Image (tube, rainbow, N blue to C red):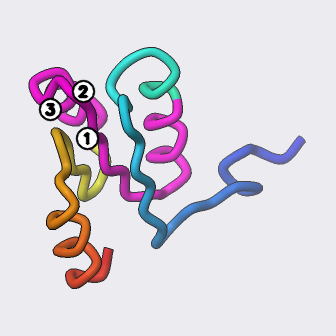
Amino acid sequence: MVAMEKLFRLDGKVALVTGGYGGIGEAVSRGLACSGAKVAISGHNGAKAAAFAESLKAEATIHGQLPLKLFRSLKRRGW
């Protein structure tokens, strides 16, 4: 049997998960990070997003509320 990590890789990709710090969003965030994606976690509760991002320890994880101008900034930085 082939491991999921070998079938599904997201290295070099960025994923934005709104509400990514609880429930289904948490599972999605973890799965994407384990597949190699950089995960941007957003939501109404910045403290919960920050705490989850810290526990996830994914490379280049961003957390908190992400305004539109930040998305433009991320794009300029090659995200």
Quadrant of the snapshot with the N terminus: top right
Q: Secondary structure at mark 1?
A: loop
Tell me: residue 58, above or below residue 72: above
Residue at image mark 2: 52
Tell me: residue 72, above or below residue 17: below
Q: Residues within 10 Å of mark 2 (few under 14, many from 20)?
A: some
How many labels, in total? Answer: 3
* Mark number displayed over residue 35: none
Tag 1 near tag 3, CB within 8 Å:
no
Tell me: residue 24, above or below residue 16: above
Q: Quadrant of residue 29?
A: top left
- Front residue (pair 30, 74): 74
Q: Residues within 10 Å of mark 3 (few under 14, many from 20)?
A: some
Residue at image mark 3: 50
Asked if residue 9 lies in the magenta stretch, the reply is no
Whole-percent x, y for residue 61 in the image: 25, 50
For badge 3, the amino acid type reads Ala
Q: Residues within 10 Å of mark 1 (few under 14, many from 20)?
A: few
- Give the residue drawn at x 46%, y 35%: 30
Asked if residue 48 lies in the magenta stretch, the reply is yes
For badge 1, the amino acid type reads Lys
Q: Which comes sooner in the sequence, label 1 or label 2?
A: 2
* Mark number displayed over residue 57: 1
- Give the residue drawn at x 31%, y 50%: 40
Q: Which comes sooner in the sequence, label 1 or label 3?
A: 3
What's drawn in magenta, residue-wise? 28-57
Q: Nearer the viewer, mark 1 or mark 3?
A: 3
Tag 2 near tag 3, CB within 8 Å:
yes
- Give the residue drawn at x 16%, y 64%: 70
Q: Secondary structure at mark 2?
A: helix
For badge 2, the amino acid type reads Phe
Q: Residue furthest right?
A: 1
